[in-house]
Image (spheres, rainbow, N blue to C red):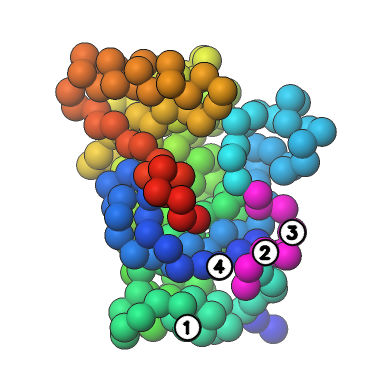
Amino acid sequence: MSKMYSVKEIYYTLQGEGFHSGRPAVFCRFSGCNLWTGREEDRDKAICQFCDTEFVGTDGVNGGKYNAAELVIQIKSLFPGPDCFVVCTGGEPGLQIDDELVKTFHESNIEIAIETNGTVELPVGIDWITMSPKANTEIVIKAGNELKIVYPQSNIKPQDFEQYAFEHFFVQPMDSPAYEDNLKQSINFVKENPNWKLSVQTHKQIGIL
């Protein structure tokens, strides 16, 4: 029997942040995370307490249980043209994405990006790895394409990750009531550390998913 993947939602939009900001993409949000249950009553006890996404269950737009072939059909139905760019996100997509899914995506001309917290091993062959480390976790993904730190975080310093083998390094101001101050701190950090770049959540600024 084929493995079934639990998906919160699948939708077509523009990537709003990081290196691929502005690029059309299908977002496939997998259910579940290893750093927070997703329940508000558990947030203050979670390892990661500032998550701004809903990843519990399978009741979002196009959410459900899919095998690899069904997931390909759903994703490609949303993207115009023969090729496709999918962003696997969560929660923590690394808990579910595996060799079978990577192979099935590639056989259908789907370019795969993943947004991971870096605490679980990933299958080989993912085309673009964005790792966003969180404080007080054990990072196992130390190489990839893009390292993006939500900033500022207590108990985590961007400089601690500069030895990791990533092509691009971003700080992104934390979306919180202190956002304006977080943005100023992020701008100042990048100006003082020019090997880093600023990422902002443009999708929230222009009002898209």
Q: Is residue 51 visible?
A: yes
Residue 19 percent coordinates (x, y)? 28, 47
Q: Are marks 3 and 1 in contact (CB under 8 Å)?
A: no
Dot 2: element: loop
Residue designated by label 4: 10
Dot 4: element: strand
- Specify few, some or many for label 2: CA neighbours under 10 Å numbering under 14, 14-19, or 20 or more: some
Is 71 situated left or right of 37 in this image? Answer: left
Q: CA distance from mark 2 to mark 1?
A: 17 Å
Residue designated by label 1: 77
Q: Are marks 3 and 2 in contact (CB under 8 Å)?
A: yes
Q: Identify the magenta region.
A: 54-62
Residue 129 shown in magenta: no
Vertical relation: 194 (above or below) 78? above
Q: CA distance from mark 3 to mark 1?
A: 22 Å
Residue 161 percent coordinates (x, y)? 35, 26
Quadrant in the picture for residue 141: top left
Residue designated by label 2: 60
Q: Nearer the viewer, residue 133 or 29?
A: 29
Q: Are marks 1 and 4 in contact (CB under 8 Å)?
A: no
Looking at the image, tell me whether mark 2 or mark 1 is earlier in sequence order: 2
Looking at the image, tell me whether mark 3 or mark 1 is earlier in sequence order: 3
**Amino acid type at mark 4:** Ile
Q: Residue reaching furthest front?
A: 206
Looking at the image, tell me whether mark 4 or mark 3 is earlier in sequence order: 4
Instruction: Please tell me whether mark 3 or mark 2 is closer to you in this view.
Output: 2
Residue at (35% x, 29% y) in the render: 171
Vertical relation: 8 (above or below) 204? below
**Amino acid type at mark 2:** Gly
Residue designated by label 3: 57
Q: CA distance from mark 3 to mark 2?
A: 8 Å
Instruction: Please tell me whether mark 3 or mark 1 is closer to you in this view.
Output: 1
